[in-house]
Image (tube, helix red, strand yellow):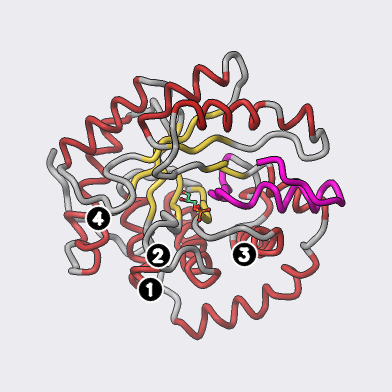
Amino acid sequence: MEYTPTLRNFGPAPTADEVSALLEKIGPQARRNCRTEVYKRCFGCIDLTSLGATDSRRSIGEFTRKAIELPRHFPEAGSVASICVYPVFVETVGLAAGDSKMAITSVSGGFPSSQTYLEVKMLETAMAIENGADEIDIVISIGEMLDGEYDLAGNEIETLRAEIGDDAILKVILESGTLSDPELIHKAATIAMEAGADFIKTSTGKNGIAATPEAAVAMCLAIRQFAEKTGRKVGFKAAGGISTAESAALYYSIVEEILGEEWLTPERFRIGASSLANNLLSEIEGREIKYF
Ligand SMILES: O=C[C@H](O)COP(=O)(O)O
């Protein structure tokens, strides 16, 4: 596929000082948002994740059954947004989920390093969708981004977007902790959105520094600029190392402040997490819950 290198300027990247100032401003609201109503909304935005080396068809089947039964055990909390697994378990989730409407997210494209052939990324993605994935999470080519090979990084995403078409939601992970610099995170966000991402996502949770509030601010600003210029409202997914109810409320508050209420639904806001659900359930129920 031909890629036209068109890294357009949708708006300036924030400086580190601007990011800090915005976070300081958001702090009080984030503390006020540490309350049951917000925790419930965060719960409904979770991509409930199991991406372990020891995952098996048995363990993922059990994980899925527990996720499906959440609203029955915890009606106040309700359901999560999706279950997120490795592609080889998409079919397992689908079988265990039965007639439930639980969405299935599959990581793909050589997750978590993205270091494989584009053809392999395409085949892995096509197979995940064929097996029932509704949403695909891929990782931007981090090394190429660090080397300034922006067209190459964008080309890959665009090719995978074309492969997926409208068959699934595409989330692009920027691995913001590795990119580190707000300007580079902002650039990666823009490249991913231009190449067709439906969501941009902070981290894999597998490569050192995971989600940070600073990266979330840089990404949400890029989403806002992109929406203002193109009219397309790309979603934001915070993921990697998010385990406390307070941190979920902080990411919620960043989205609320920068993007507004219309982003605070599972259509535009997700939290990818393997160890957040019990803590949110405990806050919502007002007692310690160890369900997962
Ligand atoms: O995509 C989701 C992340 O891999 C979850 O990371 P976590 O296991 O640190 O919560």
Along the horizontal axis of the image, is 139 left or right of 93? Answer: left
Q: Tell me the tag on residue 176.
A: 2
Type of the residue with mark 3: Ile
Residue 138's image quarter? top left
Q: Is residue 278 above or below residue 106?
A: below
Give the secondary structure at mark 1.
Answer: loop
Are the residues tagged 3 and 2 within 8 Å (C-beta)? Answer: no
Magenta-tinted stretch: 267-292
User: Does label 4 or label 3 sit earlier along the sequence?
Assistant: 4
Tell me the quarter of the image containing the C terminus.
top right
Within 10 Å of the Cα at label 2, are there few (<14), some (14-19), or many (20+) other Cα atoms? many
Disc 4 from disc 2: Cα separation: 12 Å
Disc 4 from disc 3: Cα separation: 26 Å
Q: Position of residue 71 (x, y in %)?
A: 75, 30
Give the secondary structure at mark 4.
Answer: loop
Q: Residue at x 16, y 46 (%)?
A: 3
The residue wearing badge 1 is: 180
Type of the residue with mark 4: Ser
Disc 3 from disc 1: Cα separation: 18 Å
Q: Is residue 196 above or below residue 209?
A: above
Q: Position of residue 97 (x, y in %)?
A: 57, 21
Q: Tell me the tag on residue 254.
A: 3
Disc 3 from disc 2: Cα separation: 16 Å
Along the horizontal axis of the image, is 125 left or right of 263? Answer: left
Q: Position of residue 107 (x, y in %)?
A: 38, 40
